[in-house]
Image (tube, helix red, strand yellow):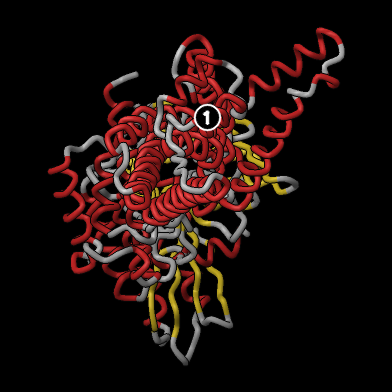
Amino acid sequence: MTPSFLRDTTLVARFEIAEAVRSKLLLVMLLLFLGAGSLGAWGFTKAVQRIEQEASSVVPGVSVKIDRSSPLYRNLIQRFVHDPAKAEYFLSLPPIVFFYAWASLGFMPWLVLFLSAETIASEVSSRGIRYSLLRTGRLPYALGKMAGQAVILAGAAAAAALAYYAVSWKLLGGVEAGGIARGMLCYWPLILLHNLPFLAWALFASMATASANLSRILSLGGAVVLAILSALSGWSFLQRGPVSAGLWKLASFLTPFGHAGGLEYPRGTPFWTDAATCLGLSLLYFGAGYALLRRRDV
Amino acid sequence: MPDAALRFTDVRKRFGKTEALAGLTLEIPRGSFFGLIGPNGAGKTTAFSIACGFLKPDAGGIEILGEPGFDPARLKGRVGASPQDAALGRETRCLEHLVYFARLQGMTAAEARRQAERVLAEVGLSDRAASRVKALSHGMLRRLAVGQALLGTPELVLLDEPTSGLDPRNVHELRELLRGIRAEGRTVVVSSHNLHELEMLCDHVAFLSRGVSIAAGPTETLTGKGEEVEIALGQGPAPVESVRRALPEDQVAWDEARRVVRISFTPLPGRQAEEVIGAAARALLDAGARIAGVRRGRTLEQKFLEMT
């Protein structure tokens, strides 16, 4: 990697971010993530308050607080999470942080798949890519686009975290403000890491197609297929024999879905395995997309 | 031959059933102002796109500034090109675009800004530096596209239909700008449908038809400027026989419809076009003809129509 390569990659990334700001794409992303974050936090806190009200009406005069020390919340988490150590970790987090992590790991990838899919394909379609490729190679160009989108994603994820924080502060009256902030700061990079293979998949779609619409279809459609594959791989009746089981396991491993579990609990081997898998898949998808872009006409 | 700025060797390119280039072999000399001429679908834009590395040839090869194929890392800042129909980001300002491109060519931020401002002034868009691309007219967009090809000091400039959509004043200004580049000794390759304009600018041309070069060389040679003379006559006598008697070694033809005497000759030391024109004019005037105009060779348009 030469200094010129790094310089070009940085220039393309900076221009990508600036273009996103100018085209209002960044604004749309921030609003979407802020909106989703606010809605999620509002829904969660309202649900908590409803449970509290119903619980206190069953036992009149007794106030039941849904916080991490509440038996109701403890039972809920232990029922969902079978690993006692993992359950204890989640119980150490303010509930809104747990919900933020769960919702972001589950839903943010779909926004990424939708919003980042057109980044290269639209330039191929308009032939605007030609102005850049006269001056730099296809690899620094594609890497710069990916880096720019990753920075935009980081900003959007931070916006979602801020929205969660602000809404929970407002509705929960500032309860555990420090703990919530620390928890979100801990999950923010993990959410980014989890979204990286999805971003790489969107870039793969963008490098494999020559129109923004086709790219979105491949990005989202392909992700739906991968999600189905990942879900099917958990069904034991499909895994007849060691070969079949191995193939399903491999298929599951190669999809970006199914790696959120380890990232939710940043301790031990499953975390490091899933973190490494997310990075590996990002490289794999990006590499496959670049292999197509390198050979194709633009 | 190391003096070629750009060389195509048996380049083939197919889009589905359409063969855009069918074995193009062409050499563009360094320092020349080269015109690529051909009807729509002749392969001009495909040839440009292959030279710039946008399209991959199915077969054959190119050599560009001594490099085997377009490598942006090795040719950084040495090749400028204005691709046809390539859109610039609509929300980006003109100056921002040019600064970005200049920086990608390896310039510092300050140098990139200087170059961007210079180019905007050269293409007459200084007052549009802060305008977003979406606010520009078609002609302004073409000028901006040409301008980005002139950032820095590229050794080779490839301009695909640079004047399409420009009004006559802009065409004139662009022509003067290109003449300036030519004077600096850089190689410029232009494709255009405007053959009159190419004739005024280009010292070398190639005719492309159905994906191959059917003729290429110095403009003077291809248009026969050194071996053909046309004399247009006004109303009155047309003493063609007098010319034939005065120039017995040359071929003299009479085009009745255009009232033109066409003389084809073999140039020799001491007997160039000027001597032939003098002898023919004397013969015509002595016989009472009225000369309406004299031209050396044929126009590119005539030659093009004859060949395609």
Residue A112 x/y as whole percent? 51, 42
Q: Nearer the viewer, residue A10 or B105?
A: A10
Q: Residue at x 50, y 50 (%)?
A: A53
Q: Nearer the viewer, residue A161 or A274?
A: A161
Q: Residue at x 43, y 29 (%)?
A: A69
Q: Residue at x 56, y 75 (%)?
A: B254
Q: Nearer the viewer, residue B308 or B271?
A: B308
Quick check: A247 above or below B135? Answer: above
Classify mark 1: helix, strand or loop.
helix
Q: Give the residue type at disc 1.
A: Pro
| Rendered-image quadrant of the N terminus of chain B | top left
- Check the image and name the residue furthest to the bottom: B236
Quick check: B222 above or below B61? Answer: below
Which picture quadrant has residue B29?
A: top left
Q: Nearer the viewer, residue B72 or A241?
A: A241
Which picture quadrant has residue B285?
A: bottom left
Quick check: A83 above or below A28? Answer: above
Is there any visible trace of residue B285 in the rendered image? yes
Q: Residue at x 16, y 49 (%)?
A: B113
For mark 1, what is the residue?
A: A197
Residue B5 x/y as whole percent? 38, 36
Q: Chain of mark 1?
A: A
